[in-house]
Image: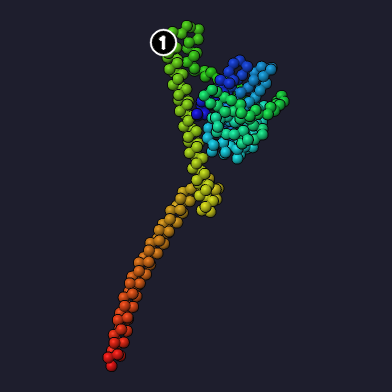
Amino acid sequence: MDAITISEALRNRHSGESWAYFNELRTRTGYSGHVGYIDAYAVGLWNNNRAFISYEIKVSRSDFKSDIDSFNKKQAEAIRNSTQFFYVCPQGLISSNEVPEICGLIEVNAGGPRVVKVAPIRQLKDGCIDIEFNRSLMRAMASTVPPKSNLWKYAGKEMTEEDILSLSKSKHKEDEEKRVNFLAKKMIEEEKRKAWAILEKFARISGYSQYSLHSGEIDKVAEDLRDTINNQKQTVGRAQEVLRYIDTLKIMVDSLAKEADKINESGEQNEKSI
């Protein structure tokens, strides 16, 4: 089960007029400073539904462990701007005792979402949501229907079967492209994470600082590593040459020893004959 399937299951959970649902909601507008994302965010729109729910979607154990290790940093804005926070995953991926006390846990299977652990409800007072987050939320609401959407050209007229089929194909193609782009982005991020994990491990073993790896000096590190390997090869080659000399000397010593034995035997026989 992938993240898109889980997100759609959450969207269905918050369908209807009493909810607004957002997928991959930016926590800030603009590009200055740190701009994070909340995987899914639901807002209650009625007086009897004043929920602000943040969802963090996880489809792999390694991704979940990485998130938990830096939970206070990674999820600070999602917690601060919500009344509840849930981890959401495929069935059996995460156990309820692994999530922090402030979090809930939802599993998704073929039957849809199932709450495994209820997240504590926190009260948000008026004005406590970050101004920048509020601006990002308003921006997402304003851009729900793109200005150039194909829907606009059908406004005010009855749609034919051909129109509906054309719109359906266009929508399916757009959704598939979004799905492919989303999966590609996830795969790239996962590969980048694995690559940096290897580099950080190399830094610990080799004595290089992680700062040098992150500051554009990787070419220098690679060159030093190649020099080290070449030096090791030269050392091994010299050692093998010395071993060959030793083998030759052993043969010579053995030959001399045999000759010495023969001379000794010959001398002993001469003494006896005298």
- Give coordinates of residue 204: x percent, y percent: 54, 51
Q: Eyeballing the image, is 99 above or below 11?
A: below
Identify which residue, 22 or 101, lies in the foreground: 101
At 53% from the left edge and 32% from the top edge, which residue is drawn? 59
Q: Quadrant of the C terminus?
A: bottom left
Is 149 on the left-hand or right-hand side of 20? left
Is 249 placed left or right of 145 in the picture?
left
Q: Where is 252 relative to 198, above or below? A: below
Residue 255 as seen in the image, left or right of residue 77 = left
Looking at this view, name the residue that lies furthest to the bottom.
274
Residue 97, given in percent of the width and then of the height, sits at 63, 35
Residue at the (64%, 32%) spot, across then down: 103
Let me know if residue 27 appears in the view. Answer: no
Image quadrant in which you'd find residue 170: top left
Can residue 111 be seen by looking at this rendering? yes
Type of amino acid at the residue the image marks with label 1: Glu
Percent from the top left, x then y, of residue 151? 49, 14
Q: Residues within 10 Å of mark 1 (few under 14, many from 20)?
A: few
What residue sits right under mark 1 in the picture? 162
Residue at 43% x, 17% y is 169
Name the element at disc 1. Answer: helix
Seen from the viewer's position, the closer of residues 164 and 260 is 260
Q: Nearer the viewer, residue 70 or 132?
A: 70
Q: Is residue 192 above or below residue 22?
A: below
Residue 179, position as x, y percentages in the image: 47, 26
Residue beneath the point at 66% across and 23% down: 51
Image vertical order of residue 152 relative to residue 40, above or below: above
